[in-house]
Amino acid sequence: MPFASLVPLLGLLAAGLGVLTGVPQVLRLLKDPDATGLSYSSAVLGALASGTWLSYGVALLDPAQLLANVPGVVCAVVTVVLAGRRLHVPLRHAVAAVSAWVPVVAAAFVLGGPVVVGVLGTTVSLVKMLPQIVTVLRRAPLTGLAPSTFVLTQVSATLWTVYGLATGQGSVVVCSAVTVVLAGVVLSRRCPPLAVARALHAGRFGVPGQLLVRPFVLARRATLTLAA
């Protein structure tokens, strides 16, 4: 089957995973009042990004963008509301941000069409991670973050990168590729690789987890034996 015929399916797969990325964080906020380490600014910017990409998808009539960002907007708004309550931040700040951003997106479409809207989407998507990265780099506790959200974000963004390359959408490529890296930074701080490997080896995630790390354990033992 030619790769070109798989491109729409790739976009839909990326969109499907994209729909799920915010769900773990929403569930965590619903179950646990602890939102320590969650950046409210990043949550608000995430809602703006989803809304901008939805506008981009509407302008291009791109099914993948529509599939990802219609529920994405809903999920992002719920996250903002819940995070505001948990962090005791007035909702009016988010409302003011949205009110200021909507005319900017509308003006971008009038002046430059979907291309300029895509540039805006890329810009806000890149900026939205910065407050969260700052929190991570400060070594603040991150117990309020849902690791699954960032795992799904990395996988989805990787697929979006490939989709953007295949369809010639430069804005999608840049935005998604950088998102892969930034989500990896957050994930590596929230779930340090060595701690995850130890948990897997200890059987915390069952036999599949032990089998996953077994080659690395055997390699490390062999290295230590040779060194001795």
Image (cartoon, grey):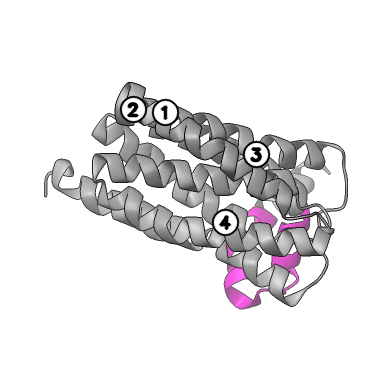
**Image spot of residue 228 (x, y percent):** 84, 44
- Cβ–Cβ below 8 Å for labels 2 and 1? yes
Total numbered labels placed on residues in the image:
4
For residue 120, above or below residue 77: above
For residue 140, above or below residue 215: above
Residue at the disc numbered 2: 110
Point out the stretch of residues depicted in magenta.
Answer: 193-218
Query: Dot 4: few (<14), some (14–19), or many (≥20) neighbours within 10 Å?
Result: many
Question: In the image, which is nearer the foreground, mark 1 or mark 3?
Answer: 1
Name the residue rendered at 88%, 46% in the picture: 140
Disc 3 to disc 4, how far (Cα)? 14 Å
Residue 42 falls left or right of residue 15: right
Q: Is residue 206 magenta?
A: yes
Residue at the disc numbered 1: 107
**Nearest the camera: 227 or 25?**
25
Disc 1 to disc 4, how far (Cα)? 23 Å
**Image spot of residue 156 (x, y percent):** 45, 50
Question: In the image, which is nearer the foreground, mark 2 or mark 4?
Answer: 2
User: Circle 3 sits in a helix, a strand or a loop, which is it?
Assistant: loop
Name the residue rendered at 73%, 60% in the picture: 83
Of callouts 1 and 3, which one flags the residue occurring earlier in the amino acid sequence? 1
